[in-house]
Amino acid sequence: MKTNSAFAQRIFPIAVISATFIGFVRLESDEPQTPQHDAIQDGQTPRAVPITRPEQKKNDHDESNVFKATEAEPSSPVLDGQPEQGETQGFDFYRDPLDAKRPMQTFEEIMKADMEAKPKVMEAQRKLLESRYDLTPHLDPIATMYRGKPLAVGPTAKLRNGVTWESLAAMSPEEIKRVGLFPYPSLPHPKQQPGGQVFPQVQIEMFPRLQRFDVDFDIPEAFLPEFPPAIFLQSRPELGDVSRGEVVSINNYYRLFKDILTPVQLDGLRLLLTPFPQEEFNPTDDRKSRDPSLGVACLDCHVNGHTTGQFHLNPDVRPEQRRFRLDTVSLRGLFNQQIHGSKRSLRSVEDFTEFEQRTAYFNGDQIHAIKKGMNILDRIQVSHMAQMQNMFDFPPAPKLNPEGKLDPAKASEREMRGQEVFFGKGQCAACHQPPTYLDHQMHDLGLEKFVNEPPIGPIKTFTLRGIKESPPYLHDGRCFTLEDTVEFFNLVLQLNLTKQEKSDLVAFMRAL
């Protein structure tokens, strides 16, 4: 199912050309592939069959109104004298959508209103992005992600009032805030209410069950990770990328991994690929997909144990207007991480696995989960899922030595200079320590000093291993490229890096 929004048609053309070029190159060397079968979609979509038998035909009783609650006869005539005649005349938690602004509306009425509002919603988001960023991708002619997608080069943020990056860096935080020149304010969800998980169009084209009717993805494809992403297993490093160019799903996981993973890991992978009801994707009338859905699998968001930049709202802050956009993080190298979730600071992969459904899946609201399809996992299943997640490894970094530093015999002069900046003037290693380039801590950058926005508090450190494969950057994706990220921290940490030092720093991070 392809989006009809004008926004998608206007914002994606160059990214689509780039993706098409990559696909063309692959087709020259690969055998033609048939469209991937979606077993989950088949499992919830009955096939139309000819009506040939009497029992298939709808009769007058089938099409009558006798099934409506208003047509049900009371169990006793005395109910006529009781309050509201014994009927539920207002909101019914289980039957009605949980939209306080539109109680008692049918699903069809809500969907119609959301679809009518969608062009305006996405047009507003498009104008916001265009005012902040140069959305025309500038692709590196040589550097690519692991499977060949070109890296987008920045910075993409637009500077106003004739300032340059150098003159902006020379200003104090107070002055930058006073004149409103901070180029990286928070990136909002296109539709804060209801928020929820939004998938990029490149993924929806393969799995149309992930299409929402009320909102579309907003960032151009060129600034996203490659799809499908590569898969690396820390248990079988000699195999390199084991994805074989496929998106792992319930259709193919056994064929791809039966000779690579243990039975326990295979079972964990099966569970990670099994869809469970989610806030926007479920079988009830309270959903944002046109058709009822079995839900969303863990690896719908963490595709191939990685990410394609899907986003939602962080589940652990209230009220609604204080919640912030949160990108899906990669599961690569999860075995090295000691805290999980940007805010929750869950202390084990098992806790992350068990509680994610009640948090990311249902926005931290277990009442919604009960209505839409709570799934209580046995701890044995949780351990299997956790073990599989612990298999996902970082991409190979052939220029790094066992300590996580560059091997001078393999690295370029530019990369070596960038490493010196990283561990010195750039102060990057204060939070991103080798060999995994994270410190298992939470940090507050205090961005409210630079921009007229409320503080968001501490966010966990994210690993920089394989960082070129994971755009966009920061917790909400406000930095589209590594160059943007360097400019962001140059301002926030007041580093006063030179243009050459910034370029060298990007080269070093690409080598990670």
Image: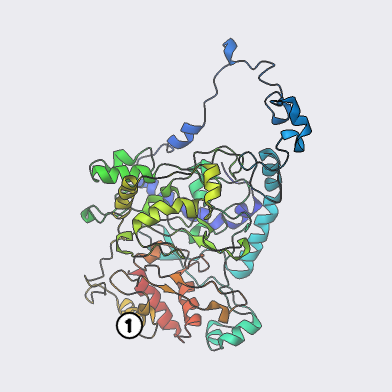
Residue at image point 47% right, 32% down: 42
| Viewer-proximal residue among 142 and 294 | 294
Percent x, y of residue 91 = 69, 43
Q: Is residue 77 above or below residue 118?
A: above
Snapshot quadrant of residue 372: top right
Q: Is residue 248 visible?
A: no
Q: How many marks?
A: 1
Amino acid bearing label 1: Glu
Which quadrant of the rendered structure holds the C terminus? bottom left
The part of the image, by quadrant, that contains residue 235 is bottom left
Color encoding of the figure: rainbow
Residue closest to the eye, 423 or 296: 296
**Secondary element at tag 1:** helix
- Left or right: 233 in relation to 493: left
Query: Between 212 and 221, which is closer to the camera in this rendering?
Result: 212
* Res 354 visible: yes
Where is mark 1, residue-wise? 420
Quadrant where the N terminus lies?
Answer: top right
**Left or right: residue 70 compared with residue 277:** right
Where residue 59 appears, as percent x and y from the top left, is 66, 15
* 230 over 490 or under it: above or below: above
Q: Residues within 10 Å of mark 1 (few under 14, many from 20)?
A: some
Q: Is residue 204 left or right of residue 384?
A: right
Quarter occupied by residue 226:
bottom left
Image coords of residue 178 (percent x, y): 64, 84
Left/right of residue 381 with respect to residue 97 in the rendered view: left
The residue sitting at the right extreme is 81
